[in-house]
Amino acid sequence: MHESIAIHPAPLRLRLAAAAYDLLPLLGLWFLAAILALAVTGGALDTHTLRGKLLVQGFALALSAAYFVVSWTRGGQTIGMRAWKLRVVDADGNRVSWARALLRFVVALISLAAVGAGFWWTLIDPQKRTWHDIAAGTRVLRKAA
């Protein structure tokens, strides 16, 4: 027997909860970014210089992008999204492509840089989409418990 499962757009509070959970793996990746920068510089990393700062930040950004893009394209969920039964899908409910996931990540950075305005947009959007959902043609859905 096949059981019908209700799926609804994810509210902002659950998206923020998932983001808080995602800080844990991100912190680990950011430590890895510092280790990679140390390895690249042969242990002579100086984060007091622009070059040193950009090297660490570049690695951190690349690893963060990889975490989100791979999570969204492979299973539609990050670790934080899994905890709250959230899934990112394209407009047709299918898996997100690499291009959409990368665009979604880039616009999410813009959303954050705008004091989170792109995230708060879910409060006025009838479909509860963020700026990065709108730009990438994605939706974040939640399975009803």
Image (cartoon, rainbow, N blue to C red):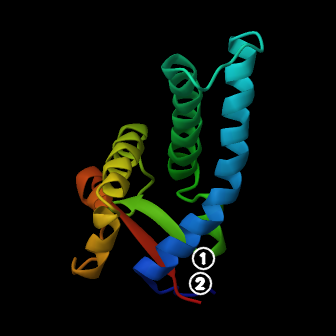
Q: Residue at x 22, y 80 (%)?
A: 124
Give the tally of numbered discs. 2
Is residue 143 visible to us here? yes
Q: Judge whether 116 appears above or below 31 on screen.
A: below
Taking depth in this image into account, of 112 and 100 the one nearest to the observer is 112
Quadrant for the N terminus, please. Answer: bottom right
The answer to which quarter of the image holds residue 56 is top right
Q: Residue at x 24, y 59 (%)?
A: 134
Q: Earlier in the sequence, mark 1 or mark 2?
A: 2
C-alpha distance separating marks 1 and 2: 23 Å
Where is residue 46 shown, x and y percent of the image? 65, 20
In the rendered structure, the answer to whether residue 122 lies left or right of residue 19 reads left
Where is residue 111 shown, x and y percent of the image? 32, 56
Which mark lies nearer to you, 1 or 2? 1
In the rendered structure, the answer to whether residue 46 lies left or right of residue 94 reads right
Is residue 10 visible to us here? no
Q: Judging from the image, what secondary structure is the residue with disc 1 in?
A: loop
Q: Residue at x 27, y 60 (%)?
A: 131
Check residue 125 in the rendering and tell me which mark sits there, or answer none. Answer: none
Q: Residues within 10 Å of mark 2 (few under 14, many from 20)?
A: few
In the rendered structure, the answer to whether residue 22 lies left or right of residue 89 reads right
Where is residue 75 shown, x and y percent of the image? 58, 54
Taking depth in this image into account, of 98 and 22 the one nearest to the observer is 22
Where is residue 84 shown, x and y percent of the image? 60, 76
Q: Which residue is mark 1?
A: 84
Q: Judging from the image, what secondary structure is the residue with disc 2 in?
A: loop
Q: Which residue is mark 2?
A: 2
